[in-house]
Amino acid sequence: MPPPGGFEAVKYKRNLPFRGPGAVVILGGVAAISAFGFYRYGQGALEKRELQREKAWSRIHLVPLLMAEGDRDAYRRQQAALAREKEIMKDVEGWEAGKSIYNNPKYASPQFVVL
C-alpha cells in the first residue's frame, strides 16, 4: 500500500546549470570590441599620417640649411686645397695656384668630394 500522503513526486525535469551568456550577448560583445578596435586603428592611422607629413615638411625646411652647410664645407675644403697647392708649388715659376687648367672663366663646382 502507498505510504500516507502518497508517493514523492517523480523528478523528471532536467536540472542543468546556467551555461553563460546567450548568442546575442556574445555577438554584441564581439561587435563592440571590433568597433572599438577599428576606431583605435583609424586614430592610429591619422596620427601616423600626421607624423609622416610633419617629417616630410621638416625635411623640406631643412634642405636650405643642409645645402648651406655643404657649401661652407666645400668652400673650406677648396681654400685648404688652394693653400696646399700654393705651398707645394711655391718653387715653380709661372704657376698660378687655383687657376683652372681649362680656359673657361665659369665656376664649376667639383664633381667629387674627397673625404
Image (cartoon, rainbow, N blue to C red):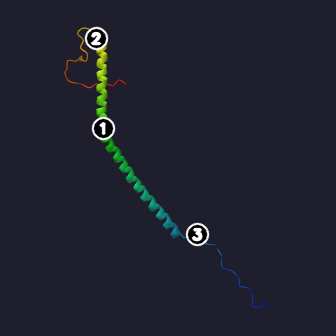
Q: Which mark is residue 63?
A: 1
**Mark found first going from the N terminus, 3 or 1:** 3
Front: mark 3 or 2: 2
Q: Alpha-carbon distance for marks 2 and 1?
A: 40 Å
Residue at image location 23% in from the left, 14% down from the top: 96
Mark 2: amino acid: Lys
Q: Nearer the viewer, residue 15 or 51?
A: 51
Disc 3: which residue: 20
Disc 2: which residue: 90
Q: Secondary structure at mark 1?
A: helix
Residue at image location 33% in from the left, 41% down from the top: 59
Q: Position of residue 76 (x, y in %)?
A: 30, 25
Q: Alpha-carbon distance for marks 3 and 1?
A: 63 Å
**Residue 111 visible, this angle:** no
Residue at image location 31% in from the left, 32% down from the top: 69
Q: Nearer the viewer, residue 44 or 96?
A: 96
Residue at the right extreme?
A: 1
Quadrant in the rendering for residue 77:
top left
Q: Secondary structure at mark 2?
A: loop
Residue 54 in the image: above or below residue 38 = above
Front: mark 3 or 1: 1
